[in-house]
Structure formats: structure tokens, C-alpha cells
Image (cartoon, rainbow, N blue to C red):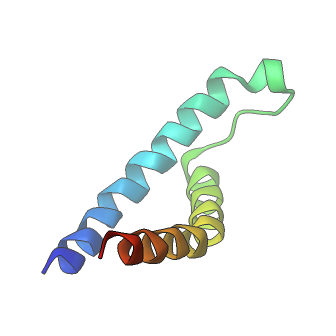
Amino acid sequence: MNDFFGIVAAGPAFFVSSWLLMLFAGIVASEVGIRPFGYVTSMVVTIGLWLALAPAAGAIARTSCRKKT
């Protein structure tokens, strides 16, 4: 049952992390040398980050579960 709630919690976490990325990109845009981007672009970047980091997070979770038992 915990897996179900984890998947349900990922939806709002996606939108919040996209929003935070958009805010922080706007804050540091002049220092980093990028143009501020909108929410839709932030969502695309967040999807890319999640797809890149999800396999690593899954591998870490599997190895940490084996060490506990």
C-alpha cells in the first residue's frame, strides 16, 4: 500500500518541483547567463531530470533495502 501512496505523491511533487525550478532559474538567470524560462519549459526540464535520476534512485533504494535485512 505504501507504493501506491508514493506514486500518488509523485504527481504534486512534480508540479511543485517544476515551479521551484522556474523560480530559481529566474532568480539566478543573470548570474548564470541564461534567459528566464516559463512553467512549461520548466516542466519539460523536470521530466528530463526525473527520467535521468529515477534509475539511480531506484538502484540506491534497492541496495539500501538489502543492507537492512
Image-quadrant location for residue 53: bottom right
In depth, the one of 8 and 30 nearer the eye is 8
The C terminus is located in which quarter?
bottom left
**Side (left or right) of 53 relative to 16:** right
- Residue for point 46% across, 48% down: 17
Image-quadrant location for residue 55: bottom right
- Please provide percent x and percent y for residue 51: 60, 72
The N terminus is located in which quarter?
bottom left
- Please provide percent x and percent y for residue 50: 56, 65
- Residue for point 60% across, 70% down: 56
In depth, the one of 30 and 2 nearer the eye is 2
Q: Is residue 62 above or below residue 60?
A: below
**Side (left or right) of 10 relative to 39:** left
- Residue for point 79% across, 33% down: 35
**Side (left or right) of 52 relative to 31:** left
In depth, the one of 55 and 68 nearer the eye is 68
